[in-house]
Image (cartoon, grey):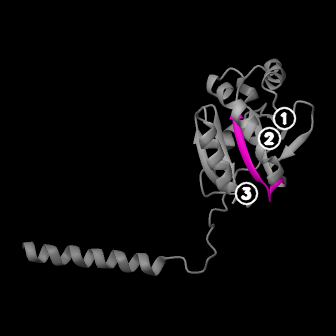
Amino acid sequence: MQPNHRRVFYALLLLVGLVWIFLSADRTNISTNGRIPAPQTGFLAPNFTLNTPDGNSITLSHLRGKTVLVNIWATWCPPCRAEMPVIQMMYGKYKDQEFVVLGINATNQDNQLDIMPFVREYGLTFPILLDETGDASRAYQLRSLPSSFFIGRDGVIKDVVIGGPMSEKLLKSRIEEILK
């Protein structure tokens, strides 16, 4: 094939590809639009129902209309320990603005007897949830502790922070962003 024919062929191939993209675009606005649950920014937060240490249950989807920080942690995790005072401080500062923190203990990876002493040591007043089976950790594709998911009033994940500890500045900026 001669160089000029090759250029024409590639140009036509590119044009056909662009026409295909244009014709196959969703113009009906009935696509999923992030409404499929997935533990990543722009997608609906996977729902869960977990128990607190005193036996009450909390379901994430029942908190729609509020902003939520889902923080998955364990008592043995040094970065989890380091960020807990800052999370508690931010919870105290923003809870009157319909900001909720759900501290999910990865109980299937932790010693359940260590949880309440940890909660008392750090003076945690936000709900602590026990992921005894690991189902919530799997739904959020937990790869590292701590893992934090900032969820907007619509139930969609606005930001994800894997690892830690989160600084006060980082946490404040993420919370203020989802409160807008």
Q: Is mark 2 on a helix, strand or loop?
A: helix
Residue 19, given in percent of the width and then of the height, sits at 37, 80
**Residue position for label 2:** 92
Please name the predominant secondary structure of the magenta segment in the image.
strand
The alpha-carbon separation of the residues under discs 1 and 3 comes to 23 Å
Q: Nearer the viewer, mark 3 or mark 2?
A: 2
| Residue bounds of the magenta highlight | 63-72
* Residue type indicated by callout 3: Gly
Q: How many labels does the image show?
A: 3
**Residue position for label 3:** 155
Badge 3: residue crowd in 10 Å (few <14, some 14–19, many ≥20): many
Residue 32, given in percent of the width and then of the height, sits at 63, 67
- Numbered tag placed on residue 125 in the rendering: 1
Please say whether residue 174 is one of the residues in the magenta stretch. no
Q: Do the residues labelled 3 and 2 touch (CB within 8 Å)?
A: no
Apparent side of residue 55 relative to residue 8 in the rendered image (left or right): right
Does label 1 or label 3 sit earlier along the sequence?
1
Hey, which quadrant is residue 75 in on the image?
top right
Q: Do the residues labelled 2 and 1 touch (CB within 8 Å)?
A: yes
Quadrant for the C terminus, please.
Answer: bottom right
* Residue type indicated by callout 2: Gly
- Image height check: is 90 above or below 65? above
* Residue type indicated by callout 1: Thr
Q: What element carries label 3?
A: loop
Q: Can residue 37 be seen in this view?
A: no
